[in-house]
Image (cartoon, helix red, strand yellow):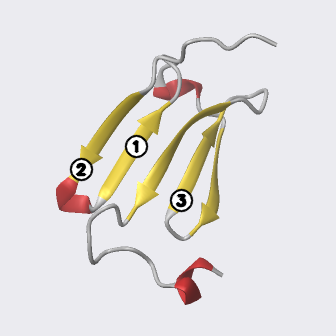
Amino acid sequence: MSSAEVPATFTSIPAAGRSYVALTSTPPTAVAETVEVLAILNVDLSEGGRLLGFEIIGALPGTIATPEENR
């Protein structure tokens, strides 16, 4: 199995306490589904279930969700 280079990009919105990591160069319109994995983590999937990127909510110190919020 060979590895391929991934054109990952990182975007931060400090005022909102959010960051996004795009794992492909696929446009955001290709997102078929967003799944909440934890209170602080959402993942974006393509129509075929391919992971396109993920959003970290509470990405600033003091804004991370508590363990109770992650249940």
Q: Earlier in the sequence, mark 2 or mark 3?
A: 2
Q: Quadrant of residue 1?
A: top right
Which mark is first along the chain, 1 or 2? Answer: 2
Residue receiving disc 1: 20
From the image, tell me which residue sits under label 2. 13
Position of 70 with respect to 3 (left or right) is left
N-terminal-most mark, 3 or 1? 1
Three-letter amino acid code of the residue under disc 2: Ile
Residue 41: which disc?
3
Query: Residue 40 placed where, x, y %?
Result: 49, 66
Identify whether 59 is placed above or below 34.
below
- Asked whether disc 2 touches disc 1, contact meaning CB atoms under 8 Å apart, the reply is yes
User: Gap in Å between the C-alphas at discs 2 and 3?
Assistant: 15 Å
Q: Are marks 2 and 3 in contact (CB under 8 Å)?
A: no
Question: How much space separates mark 2 and mark 1, taking CA atoms?
Answer: 8 Å
Dot 2: within a 10 Å radius of its alpha carbon, few (fewer than 14), some, or many (20 or more) residues? few
Disc 3 + disc 1, Cβ < 8 Å: no
Distance between mark 3 and mark 1 Cα atoms = 10 Å
Q: Residue at x 66, y 81 (%)?
A: 71
When the figure is inspected, residue 61 is found, relative to residue 6, above or below; the finding is below
The one of 4 and 64 positioned closer to us in this rendering: 4
In the picture as drawn, the residue positioned furthest to the bottom comes out as 68
Question: How far across and down, in percent of the image, does residue 34 sit?
Answer: 61, 47
Q: Which residue is found at the position 62% from the left and 60% from the top?
A: 36
Which amino acid, by three-letter code, is at mark 3? Leu
Residue visible at 17% across and 59% down in the picture: 15
Query: Where, by quadrant of the figure, is residue 56 drawn?
Result: bottom left
The 10 Å Cα crowd at callout 3, few under 14, some 14 to 19, many 20 or more, is some
In the figure, is residue 26 to the left or right of 59?
right
